[in-house]
Image (cartoon, coloured by chain):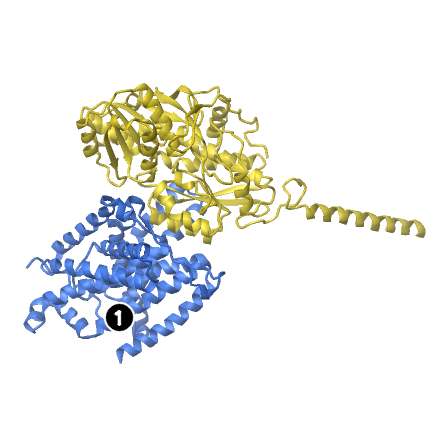
Chain colours: A yellow, B blue
Amino acid sequence: MKRSHRVNAVALAGFTAVAMVVAACSSGGGSKPSSSSSALTASAPGITSSQILIGTHQPLTGVAAPGYDEIAAASNAYFQYVNAHGGVYGRKIAYKILNDQYDPTITSTVVHQLVLQDNVFAVFDGLGTPTHLAVVKYLNSSKIPDVFVASGCECWNDTGTEPYTTGWQIDYVREGKILGNYIKQHFAGKKIGYFYQDDEFGMDGVKGLDDEIPKSQVVARQSYNPAVTNVAPQVTALKAAGAQVVVSFSVPAFTALLKLTSLKLSFSPQLAVSNVGSDPITLAGLLEAYAKQGGATVAGNQLTQGIITDGYLPSLGDSGNSWIQLFTKIHSQYLPKLPLDGNVAYGMAVGYTFVQAMLKAGRNPTRQDLVDAINKGLPQGVSVAPYAYSATNHNGVTGAYMAVIKNGVLVATGPTQVTDTSSTGAITTDNAAQPTAPASGIPSP
Amino acid sequence: MTLARHVAAALVVAAILVLVSIQLSSYRDYQMAEVAAYVVAVAGLTVLIGLSGQISIGHGAFMAIGGYASALVLLHLGWPLEAVLAVGAVVAALAGAVFGVAAARLRGPYLAGATLMLAVALPTIANQYPKQFGGDQGLSVSITTPAFLGATFPPTRWLAWVTCAAALIALILLANLSRSRVGRSWRAVRDDEVAAALSGLNVARLQILAFVVSAACAGLGGALLAVVTGIVAPGAYTLTLSIALLTAAVLGGLGTLPGALWGSLVLVLVPTYLTNVGTSRGLSSAASSSVPIAAYGVILILVMLAFPAGIQGGLRRFFGPATATPLTALFRRTPGSEHQEEGPS
């Protein structure tokens, strides 16, 4: 009896020793993403064993709010979906959304709050060109990942001095080139007018347009200041120059103002609008609201009919598309109060991309791991064209398809085209089919 | 004598602020820097309204002038920080002198209207000349923490030190000025212009001087705010800012320098605090972003009902002369009745 007791004790000691060695091995490999059994640790600021805290600055009130105020809510809906289905390696994503009213000074204040007070792991999808430019230096000097900025400014692609910042949506130069190429082909010899926001957003777009449209065809270049809502001087100038096609790099509110002011001045050129300013549902709502303020009644969808634009996400009208089906499912479950429009699709799509990057960054990622994961390139998912991400390129989506608005949805008029940001880079057709959405709705690591 | 007392008090406060800033988190240091920047601007405004009896609803414009002037000097000439801040104050003072000449001829609502115009018109100049002023996205202002503090020194603590030092210097000068002959003359002009003129005071010159001093403070405040937020952009200097400064001066207690501090604290801390409360109570982001605006109005109404002489007036009522430190005892007269009835003459 006594003897067998001792045997048991020896066996137990041996077993314990083996167990300890195994445990030591697995915890020694804890930093490796491949080790799926390792414990979840607080591997970086903003990351605990149960949560990933990220933050953003968004225009929830003010001139840029109409439409754009849905984006962060939609990303959050996608994160809730992911959280309900196991999270990112078991951690839930918490998303802190602060209002900067599209004012760069407030952006600076709220981003300091996110970084210094809330200790976020990363700033995600900060919205706006002028606003985000105010914090890029600060975020990079503080080594905070500044991922998937909600703006197509080429300025986010500066891996030399701003290695922590990455773009996501198609940049305005590429977009301008693809739009310009279409206009060059379909409106040869016609008089063309530009209408654009007078900051990097508009100027990048114009740069792309100028790469394609012959200078001699451009009869007017009119910019607007987002703080001034009267665009009658610009529209008058476009009309006086006899523009037959007006290309607009504008936020939705100013696309609507352009359209309504044109109507008032009985000026009806063919409109071509960049993706960020052309979401049909947002536009229709704005057109109806603004017309009502002016004492008129209009049918929004009628006014957007025939606007030429481009898309880099699948069209919401394509109900057979697996991504649109996924968005519709999440929308009806987590975000039923908002319309399922381009902004909501955008928010979910960029949220998907963030989860993709976090899964690649590993089980217990540091801030640098997230940036490194993006530098290694992300597989194409929710966008119609591949990403440009590499260690030396922080642009996002590299292509788009041309489309026209019909009955409130984008209808593609051509295949996906990809290009680069140089003035001589060719525009080529991308024949590869877009990958379908994973059945779980969550990217695979 | 007075100067020595003020300097001694300021040194004590400075020592306390340094200790406090070391205890606080980086974000609180950042907020401290923001408060200090606003204190300078609000103090200038409170002296203008409370002491010289002139009103300005356009002080945000002088902050813009100071902010842009210092940003341009920093960008193009790369001057040291002290010089950059001084330029902000000096350029705004010059603008104040020009505007003061016009202001000295205007009274009450007419002066309010003129300053209002300044607040509305000036920021759009930045959009008119995007090459010089960076248009809507403004100019970036970045300063570095000096090397002797070491690489790990929190940058926001350095910002807090710089802004608090500048604010203390500005407050010492204002406190001294208001106790001097000039301050007494301002009060005389405020209380009765005709009587002051009959006593041999040059009313117009005194009023212009008040505008210059006040604009210099706003300019310095603007320069400090630019350094703190790292940016000057027209969106920051809208009419809303001017009204906020005025509200802060009134909330704190018109004509009192400590009142400028209370007002600035409300201005900076209330919005962030309430947004956080709103979000943690489960309000949507859109709803909680409207809470601070509503709360600001409620606070203003409550303070005005309970303490018509502002927070400082309320404190004085509760604690009596015991709170009369050299800085708080400066303006014993609580305005409210003295300087309103200045119709067009």
Query: Where on the picture, by quarter, is residue A411?
Result: top left
Query: Where on the picture, by quarter, is residue A300?
Result: top left
Horizontal arrangement in the rendering, residue B205 relative to residue B261 (left or right): left
* CA neighbours of label 1 inside 10 A, class few (<14), some (14 to 19), many (20+): some
| Residue at (33, 41) in percent of width and height | A61
Observer able to see residue B336: no
The image position of residue A228, as x and y in percent, is: 24, 39
The extreme front residue here reads A424
Q: How many marks?
A: 1
Closest to the observer: B13 or A329?
A: B13
Closest to the observer: B304 or A348?
A: A348
Observer able to see residue A184: yes
The image position of residue A393, as x and y in percent, is: 47, 38
For disc 1, the marked residue is B173
Horizontal arrangement in the rendering, residue A308 relative to residue A429 (left or right): left
Decide: is A179 above or below A57: above
| Residue at (46, 62) in percent of width and height | B24
Horizontal arrangement in the rendering, residue A368 relative to residue A224 (left or right): right
Image quarter in which the N terminus of chain B is found: bottom left
Image quarter in which the C terminus of chain B is found: bottom left
The image position of residue B137, as x and y in percent, is: 32, 45
The image position of residue B82, as x and y in percent, is: 32, 64
Amino acid at circle 1: Leu
Query: Where on the picture, by quarter, is residue B28?
Result: bottom left
Decide: is A243 above or below B297: above
